[in-house]
Amino acid sequence: MQPATAKWYDRREAVFIEFCIEDSKDVQVKFDKTKLDFSCVGGTDNIKHHNEVDLFESIDPNESKHKRTDRSVFCCLRKAEPGKSWPRLTKEKTKLNWLSVDFNNWKDWEDDSDEDLSSFDRFSEMMNNMGGEDDLPDVDGADDEESADSDDESKFS
């Protein structure tokens, strides 16, 4: 057995973990108050994966959920104390080579007062809409070229 590669990110109400296993079978996710236990068989080689995580803080196991897709298993761990930031996923400060931060979804939410829809509700909404890549995120600076062009045109007119 080997650990599945995973990435995680923190939000106000929940912590999200994505186990990156394609074509997973026999998926088992056990949520305990201070621990997450994940196992599955994945890939074309049918490799057995197992991850056990002692969590940084407590979660609500009854409100935590997971969803399997063809490409991964996505877990939403509902925080026992919403609004408390998790600087890391694990209780211990050890570096796990199979775990990384999901910087594409990381957000410095502590300073953000705009969150009217809770992250947990967004997770549920995302799970319902999951599948397509039509809604790509905006890239910062994508409009810079247009504004540079329009500035250039006005200078040369």
Image (cartoon, grey):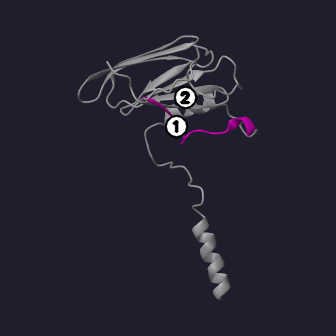
At a point 61% along the width and 66% down the height, the residue shown is: 144
Q: Nearer the viewer, mark 2 or mark 1?
A: 1
Examine the rendered structure and indicate whether residue 156 appears above or below residue 75: below
Q: Is residue 133 left or right of residue 151?
A: left
Q: Is residue 50 left or right of residue 137?
A: left
Dot 1: element: loop
**Residues under numbered marks 2 and 1 in contact, where contact means CB atoms less than 8 Å apart:** yes
Q: Residue furthest top?
A: 32
Q: Tell me which amino acid carries mark 2.
A: Phe
**Image-quadrant location for residue 51:** top left
Examine the rendered structure and indicate whether residue 31 appears above or below residue 25: above
List x then y, in percent, for residue 6: 45, 30
At a point 74% along the width and 39% down the height, the residue shown is: 111
Q: Which mark is first along the chain, 1 or 2?
A: 2
Dot 2: element: strand
Magenta residues? 98-112
The stretch drawn in magenta includes residue 93: no
Q: Residues within 10 Å of mark 2 (few under 14, many from 20)?
A: many
Residue position for label 2: 16
Residue position for label 1: 102
Nearer-the-camera pick, 92 or 2: 92
Q: Main secondary structure of the magenta part?
A: loop
